[in-house]
Amino acid sequence: MFTLRSRSVRALAAGVAAALVLTACAGTHDGDGGSPEGTVTLRVNYWGDFGLDELVPRYTAAHPHIRIQLNAGDYSQQHEDLQKFLVAGSGAPDIAAIDESQAVQFRNQASKFVNLLDKGAGAYEDDYLPWNWQLLRSPEGRQVGLGTDVGGQAICYRTDLFEAAGLPTDREKVSALWPTWEAFLAAGKRYEQGSGGKKFVDGAGLFLEMVIRQQPVGYFGPDEKLAMDGGPRVGWELATALVAEGLSANLQPFTPEWNAAMKNGGFAALTCPAWMQGYIQGQAPNTKGRWDIAYPPGGGGNLGGSFWSIPAQGRHTDEAYRFVEWLIQPEQQIAIFKKVGNLPSQPALYDDPAIRDFRNPFFNDAPVGRIFPDTARKVTPQYQGRLTDQVRTAVSNVLDQVQQGKISGPAAWEKARSEAERAAR
């Protein structure tokens, strides 16, 4: 199985190391973080790579009374720990990242977070994608978090493997290969015929989620009722077709085997949210220039994205808000996009030449500053249910069994539905 935004494991060791370095630079401190007298330490919990390691020293240099302790951890564990801290009433970090798939769970506990509107965050509402701003707006009107990035969709592909298989390599021609998911499957069959047995895609898991996210309704409707016959059924049919047609390497994302295949050309294409750029660059640095990026089948789409929140139990909520406010400013958002690929949640920045004209040299100078904003703008807002993560995991586990050859056909779908219903209860 995999957990969405399992970019959670991306550069985890590097993140932990960064936390140690930044903490060491700050000097010794007591349990609440007050270091040399008069200073304030802010604990920041997140997962993966949010592009903070170069930004934090800039902030603390300009604010010498502030120390930032970065605590990178596992995606699931960070959210589980945050929930425990909220219930206990203590232990929460000063700033906590929240994934968009967890939005409903935490916005329904809005009283346990600082209402960022009280800190002046309302001034930024018009800067955000409307659906993104609303994700962490509670029913009573409290703003639980400010968006830092969204997962605008694309397809990353290996130009050298496409060329060897007789497929076009120019990104415009590649995009034209697959206006629909049916055409994507047809392109995969062409690739298989010319590749000498090499697999077209990495696995079915992320494609399942990508297709689901393009649908009007995902795992749950706004009434919190499971909706398996909508978007999930459409995604399931595409994902299992990739397996049945022999187009998939049947690898699970964010595993050592998947990382190795990324380095060694074990697959030619994978679903590529904006944040995936940083993951590929980190895992397969020797493949620079062999990748390119095309538009996805089916139009737009979003997979992943995060928010900064401030638990109300913190002792330094003003200082925490000032740091979050600094992180969402254009200069920092642009720097993060260029460094790790995280696409800002603020569409006003998409027209800034620093983003619009940015090309990623690792990906054959792909115009990522145009591709990812284009797909992000086409997103159909989709309700994320309170138990979406649990249901997604249950369905993913059954899909793994399909990829392992343990189950197939209608029986596989019925098991996926049954496991989803169990998780939803």
Image (cartoon, rainbow, N blue to C red):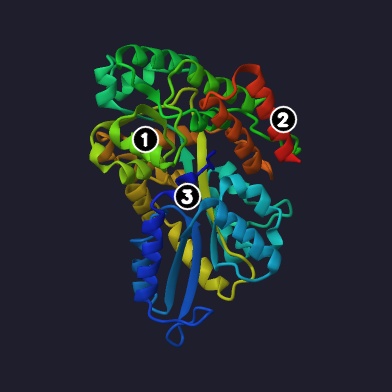
Comparing labels 2 and 1, the label whose residue is closer to the camera: 2
**Disc 3 from disc 2: Cα separation:** 28 Å
On residue 418, the disc is 2
- Dot 3 lies on which element? helix
Label located before the other in sequence (2 or 1): 1
State the image coordinates of residue 28 (x, y, percent, origin top left): 41, 82
Instruction: Looking at the image, tell me whether mark 3 or mark 2 is earlier in sequence order.
Output: 3
Residue topped by disc 1: 370
Residue type of the residue flagged with mark 1:
Arg
Considering the numbered disc 2 on the image, is that residue within a helix, a strand or a loop? helix
For disc 2, the neighbor class at 10 Å (few under 14, some 14 to 19, many from 20) is: some
Q: Identify whether 62 is placed above or below 47.
A: below
User: Residue 303: image x %, image y %?
Assistant: 51, 38
Identify which residue is drawn at 49% across, 78% down: 33
Pick the quarter of the image with the N terminus.
top right
Look at mark 3 in the image and give the residue it sits on. Answer: 8
Location of residue 267 by image quarter = top left
Q: Residue at x 34, y 17 (%)?
A: 197
Q: Residue furthest bottom?
A: 37
Task: Say whether residue 177 is left or right of residue 205.
Answer: left
Count the numbered circles shown.
3
Which of the two discs, 1 and 3, labels the residue nearer the N terminus? 3
Name the quadrant containing residue 256. top left
Q: Check disc 1 and report its element: helix, strand or loop.
A: helix
**Cα distance between the residues tagged 1 and 3:** 26 Å
- Residue 260 location, x and y as percent? 34, 38
The 10 Å Cα crowd at callout 1, few under 14, some 14 to 19, many 20 or more, is some
Closest to the observer, 402 or 194: 402
Amino acid at dot 2: Ser
Mark pair 2, 1: CA separation: 41 Å
Visible in this render: residue 382?
yes
